[in-house]
Image (tube, grey):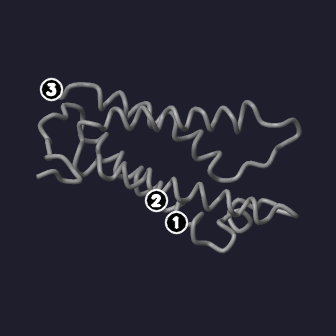
């Protein structure tokens, strides 16, 4: 009989377990803003990011809700890997590194001229890049 989740295989992961724990923490820290974006009345756009929404308020909040839904699902996938499929930890850390690299590039290097406002996520992503790279390296190293 087929099941939703294939059999558990802890022995297939040979990297450092700190990377798996980090991925689980990243999953939780991805779900929390997803819940905020999905369920806060303004999606966090005004109350947290301090954006001035103006006439496009509904569009911005709708975009935040869409982003929140994807964050929740992405975070749940990270938790599934951390708790059930640790052998996928290097792949997921690489995906996080690519995602955050693209975001940081857009927010900090390709920002529109004159734009100086940066919500908290912009700073968090910039700080997260080297941390994710470290845990990716640890996940790829074999344990002694």
Q: Is residue 74 left or right of residue 69?
A: left
Compared to 47, does 10 lie above or below?
A: above
Other residues around mark 2 within 10 Å, as few (<14) / some (14–19) / many (≥20): many
Q: Which mark is residue 57?
A: none
Q: Residue at x 56, y 40 (%)?
A: 127
Residue at position x 35%, y 46% from top?
A: 22
**Residue 53 falls in image quadrant:** bottom right
The residue identified by callout 2 is 31
Element at badge 3? loop
Sequence-wise first label, 1 or 3: 1
Q: Which mark is residue 35?
A: 1
| Residue extending furthest toward the front | 1
Considering the numbered disc 1 on the image, is that residue within a helix, a strand or a loop? helix
Q: Is residue 53 above or below residue 88?
A: below
At which x and y percent is residue 63?
Answer: 67, 57
Report x, y in % for residue 11. 11, 37
Q: What residue lies at 84% left-to-right and 42% top-to-bottom?
A: 115
The residue shown at (33%, 32%) is 90
Badge 1 density bin: few <14, some 14–19, many ≥20, Cα 10 Å: some
Mark 3 highlights which residue? Answer: 144
Element type where label 2 sits in the image: helix
Left or right: residue 64 compared with residue 50: left
Q: CA distance from mark 1 to mark 3?
A: 39 Å
Q: What x and y, as percent, mark residue 15?
A: 23, 32
Disc 3 from disc 2: Cα separation: 33 Å
Q: Are marks 1 and 2 in contact (CB under 8 Å)?
A: yes
Looking at the image, residue 45 sits to the left or right of residue 7; the answer is right
Task: Judge the density around disc 3: few (<14), some (14-19), many (≥20) Cα neighbours within 10 Å.
Answer: few
């Amino acid at each position: 009989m087929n099941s939703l989740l294939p059999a558990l295989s802890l022995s297939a992961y040979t990297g450092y377990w700190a990377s798996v724990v980090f991925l689980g923490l990243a999953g939780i820290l991805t779900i929390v803003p997803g819940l905020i974006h999905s369920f806060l009345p303004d999606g966090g756009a005004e109350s947290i990011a301090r954006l001035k929404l103006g006439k496009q308020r509904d569009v911005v909040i709708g975009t935040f809700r869409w982003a929140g839904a994807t964050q929740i699902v992405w975070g749940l996938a990270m938790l599934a890997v951390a708790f059930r499929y640790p052998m996928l930890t290097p792949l997921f850390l690489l995906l996080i590194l690519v995602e955050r690299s693209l975001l940081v590039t857009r927010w900090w290097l390709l920002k529109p001229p004159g734009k100086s406002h940066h919500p908290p996520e912009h700073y968090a992503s910039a700080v997260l890049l080297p941390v994710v790279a470290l845990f990716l390296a640890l996940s790829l190293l074999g344990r002694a």
